[in-house]
Amino acid sequence: MSSQASRRAVTVRKSPLRLEVDSWYPPDPRKFTPDQVEVYLIQNSLFLWALQILQEKHPCGELSYFQIAGIHGFPYQPWDEPNCAPEVGNQGYCTHDSLLFLPWHRPYMALFEQVLYNITVTDILKEVPEIAHDEWKQAADTWRLPYWDWAVKKLRVWTSPNPSLPGRFVSAEKIYDLPIIAQNPTIKVKNYANPKGRDVVINNPMYQFRMPDNNPMGSFGIKDIRVKVGGDDKDCQKPKVSEWVTLPFSQSRATSRWAATPPKGEAVGKPWEDGTVDNESVAPALKAHEWYDGDFEKIPLAEMVYRLYDPEYVKTFAQFATTKQPSHWSVQPRGRTEEAEEAPGPFAQLSPTAQPVGQTDGNASTLLNLEFIHNNIHVWVGGFGDYTGHMAKVPVAGFDPIFFMHHCNIDRLFAIWQALDQDNTTGETRTTSWFPAHYEERGNWHLPPGTVPTANTDLAPFHKNAEGEFWNSVGIEKWTSLGYSYPELQPWRPEFRAGGKLNDDKYK
Ligand code: TYR
């Protein structure tokens, strides 16, 4: 087989909607017609089964969960690029602190969605009995990767744990929260081999990813990450002593959220190895919104997202999209600057001497951007302070399955920007609002020295055809060409027509 034939093309399917993931779990099922509930239950079950099958695939398989999650950071190996020079492949592919941040993650999410869809066809649908087959096939064909809108408060209803009062209502509240699908270690799904029979309970593949055969991730190239802690306590409440701590991700056999960082010099211990998921800590972190830089202390999540679309605060695509702002073009790569990894690699540049963001300028208008909000969500889900988890660290973030629903939401916010920002008369995205014509971004470790990202820069390793051509930002600009859209972006809905903003042909 020629090397090119092995390349995986992300191809085009029809474009149904990606939905908010909690819509699969209505807090009050009476608000849905029985038909809707049934479709959602089937799609939800298909998704969870497919994800479980994907996660069980051997880490060496190119289309395993391990390798797809590993495109983002560790293990720093080429993916679907058989002829890739080791020096090119020997780093994570993700593009952060760059104008390519939003475009790059778009084909990434589409790849994940497509791989899950393929599993529903090859592994699941053929087991569905004849009598239910059409219904399940229809659900599979219209299923799309759901997003987690972390900026919308969700209704949560608590019922009495008292067994003599089963289901008795205790209280209800609207809170920022993890999606229901990611909360518990086990989850109920429909049995595809016997859809009219009882539901079954499976290990929840959205709660955490567990390595096939329970191998430590280090056996397949996941390294430890060293971080410097202590020195930059912004309120100066702690003495300014900083020290390097090793986060032993190589020893994890499953992903963690808010796991206690193993104390220095002590054995790693079973809770870390087995993966500790403390979901109870995520909602308070989302609520507390301790933005890690800038003047944002008092601004809640929903307001931050709202401001992204307010021209008062954000004017250009570059400003909207990335932490790499024009005033920082000549500055070191940014992000959590205390982070470094043990093995030499791109993150080693983020040395303690790199300029922390807030010190170059802590000005809210240059720090308000989608990538900044996204960074904070990563840290609030993974953990910070004396706690950590996969989501909090770039090289391992892709292994926590919530990563894909988080990034699906990032893609949605990107698409909403694009839709709002069209030229009314032509329906085209305004050039000033897309990649600037004269862009001089510098200091991007993922591009060869001296090159700047443009709309034509390859979004490696995502191929658009079997010849091995890469997607670029021009190719992914129109998200519907990747086979999906979002609920807010349906130009056929009357409220959108009335606004006169969207051009029907372009966003059908
Ligand atoms: N390292 C980023 C920060 O501290 C957060 C982050 C984590 C961003 C994982 C992306 C990611 O994939 O700001």
Image (cartoon, rainbow, N blue to C red):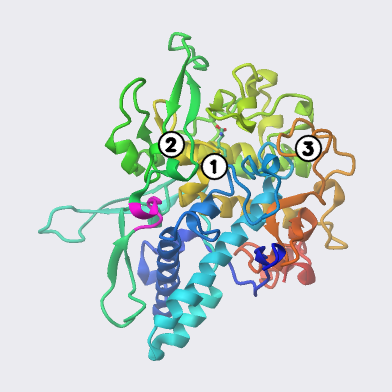
Counting from the top left corner in percent of width and height, residue 466 is at 71, 67
Q: Secondary structure at mark 1?
A: loop
| Mark 1 → mark 2, Cα distance in angstroms | 10 Å
Q: Which residue is mark 3?
A: 448
Q: Which residue is mark 1?
A: 74
* Disc marking residue 349: none
Rendered-image quadrant of the N terminus: bottom right
- Say which label, 3 or 2, has the lower sequence index: 2
For badge 3, the amino acid type reads Pro
Q: Is residue 98 magenta?
A: no
Counting from the top left corner in percent of width and height, residue 267 is at 30, 27
Q: Secondary structure at mark 3?
A: loop
Is residue 150 visible in the rendered structure shown here?
no
Counting from the top left corner in percent of width and height, residue 261 is at 37, 29
Whether tag 1 and tag 2 are in contact, CB under 8 A, the answer is yes
Q: Which residue is mark 2?
A: 249
User: Is the CB of mark 2 within 8 Å of ligand 1?
Assistant: no
The magenta stretch spans which residues?
204-213
Rendered-image quadrant of the C terminus: bottom right
Whether tag 3 and tag 1 are in contact, CB under 8 A, the answer is no
Work out whether 371 lies above or below 130.
Answer: above
User: In this image, 256 relative to 410: left or right?
Assistant: left
For badge 2, the amino acid type reads Phe
